[in-house]
Amino acid sequence: MATEKMEFQTEVRDMLNLMINSLYSNKEIFLRELVSNAADALDKRRFLSLSDASLLPVGTQLRIDIEVNKDQKRLTVTDNGIGMNKEDLINCLGTIARSGTKNFIKNLKDSDKASVDLIGQFGVGFYSIFMVAKKVEVLTLKAGDTQGYLWSSEGTGEFEISEAPRDEVGTKITLYLKDDEDAEDFTSEWKIKDIVKKYSGFVNYGIFFHPEATKNDKGELEVKPEEKLNDKVALWRQSEKEVKEEEYKEFYNVICHDGDEPLTWTHSHAEGSQEFWSLVYIPSKAPYNIWQNDSLKGLKLYVKKVFIMDDCKELLPPWLRFVRGVVDSEDLPLNVSREILQSNKIITNIRKHVIKKVLDSLQSMADKDAAKYNAWWRELGMILKEGFYMNWEHLDELKKLLRFESTKTEGDALVSLDEYVKRMPESQKEIYYLVGDKNAVKSNPMLEAFKAKGYEVLLMSDGIDEFMMTSLLEFEGKKFHDISKGDVDFEKTDDEKKAEEANKGLFKGLCENLQKILDEDISEVRVSSRLKDSPCCLVTSEDAMSAQMERMMKAMGQKNFQKSKRILEINPTHPICEMLKAKAEAKEDLGDWPKALYGQALLAEGSPLPNPAEYVSAITKLLTAAAK
Ligand code: ADP
């Protein structure tokens, strides 16, 4: 086969461009990515050999070897893992299949150079080598094949593939380093050792460094023996007492390709009818790709210390998809398949255990360090909220983990349901909440009467809140009440009740008048008992879809839902309403006021105006009249 020239896919080219011109200072992560790919390849070879022993002859030591050549500015990483055939080379080192990558590239372009660090999370770690190499060669033979291949590229638009002799199964990657000082550093022995120890100490296969031959005093070439750089294997199989905090953190950085510290972790060993180990981390920040389910790392599954798979989805519910770590079972069969996993008692048991551990550690974090927990909640709480409409088993634990902003929280503070219930005044019977646009919900006029009464209202503005509230019906016997729906039913004094009745009669004429003018948009106009300072607000009848839900359905492109007409409530003590009442009694035209009031009510709750021009014209006329 002659040498074939091929073009990189456009996304890859974009990526390479960014790498070649990268000013990112932490370039050493390329070695972490190479070693991690090599370890994956070794995992795959070992795994496939479980069903086809010929792929791994008895006595083969699976390993990774690193060599340097200072004069030629060359660095080589070799593994005897699964290897690649021609097709693999084209597919894996020429295209990007995964969906999260575009976002990653965009993020990099947009500024934040630090995010190069996360390259491994996006399944494109290989390309980071072009931060330091001007040319790369990949010589490889796939297990079970006889023909080897050589892939090479300078990281510009193209790569080349040719047949090449190779006796050993596995992959040898040679980097010809750039001429700048940064890159030259990567032929230094201490530097390489340092990087490998830092990032890859926990790799499950031996990583060996081969020092360059040096001349001794007599001018003879001396070859020093290879040196093993890693020895900390299977951290999760050690007892909790043996492992240092630093080691836990290092291990997290390795398996997550993440330089941050985890929020917390839980490490346990279960014995009895089943034996397994689990080391489970809760990240402190949302992984970049948390919304792209396909490229998450999740929990790694091992059986008897043998790696089986990354991201074993059967071990975690989707609402805990931010969790990272390792599960190692002594009882599952080594040749476990997806089908077995899906209906397996052992897996179900481990899953239960993991869920409990994660929820317990979150609860204990929340009890011990509220500020830390609240910060975490702001990052990842919305994923946990998905738990409310996807499961019925853990609702009680989840309810205790919920945090909200409210009419009584300030700054970074959040309130839990426990706290909310504890500080409810005696006269308050239900848990009040309001869902709305993030910027508007705090100042929604509907809150006025509740504030005046001293009743706290939970404020929600995550997209998921409406859905969550359909499953969250009560807490400790107290019902949840959406204050934008139905009538306000909190206890009123006799005087308040009398005044309300009287106002109903007094404002009847104005209400009818407004109704006629706004009939297209409004189902009813009535006197409000929830307003203090604002002239009016819009509420929804008890059984109708809330305004927030309607906005979301629209945003999701749903067109076929019946838009419900709202109820306009007016404030009998507000000067505007009093003035309009007088006009109505004198049978005067209400002019631009109804349109203006309706527009104000929409804006106050963060809803868009159906007809902005009409609203602006009404307001301009009223302002002009006031200016005269
Ligand atoms: P990721 O490792 O996250 O999939 P990379 O860009 O680092 O993303 O690598 C792309 C693919 O190239 C890998 O998934 C693997 O299939 C292949 N690959 C890379 N390095 C090796 C290697 N040393 N041995 C075998 N396959 C490899």
Image (cartoon, helix red, strand yellow):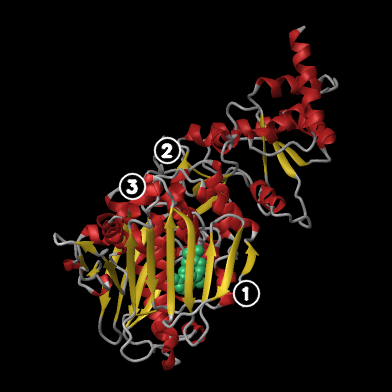
Q: Secondary structure at mark 1?
A: loop
Residue 213, given in percent of the width and then of the height, sits at: 25, 65
The local crowd at label 3, few if under 14, some if 14 to 19, many if 20 or more residues have their Cα within 10 Å, is: few
**138 shown above or below 437:** below
Choose between 465 and 590: the one closer to the eye.
465
Considering the image in quadrants, where does the N terminus appear? bottom right
Which callout, 3 or 2, points to the residue nearer the camera? 3
* Left or right, 297 with reference to 597: left
Q: Amino acid at mark 1?
A: Ala
Residue found at x 44% / y 61%? 322
User: Is residue 309 in view?
Assistant: no
Q: What residue did someone put label 3 on? A: 372
Q: State if disc 2 and disc 3 touch (CB < 8 Å).
A: no
- The mark nearer the N terminus, 3 or 1, is 1
Residue found at x 28% / y 67%? 209
Choose between 142 and 596: the one closer to the eye.
142
**Residue behind label 3 places its C-beta within 8 angstroms of ligand 1:** no
Residue 23, given in percent of the width and then of the height, sits at: 46, 43
Indicate which disc residue 409 carries.
Answer: 2
Residue 304, given in percent of the width and then of the height, sits at: 32, 83
Residue found at x 74% / y 56%? 558
Residue 234, given in percent of the width and then of the height, sits at: 27, 73
Which callout, 1 or 2, points to the residue nearer the camera? 1
Q: Amino acid at mark 3?
A: Lys
Choose between 340 and 388: the one closer to the eye.
340
Q: What residue did someone put label 1 on? A: 2
Q: Cα distance, mark 3 to mark 2?
A: 16 Å
* Left or right, 424 with reference to 561: left
**628 shown above or below 58:** above
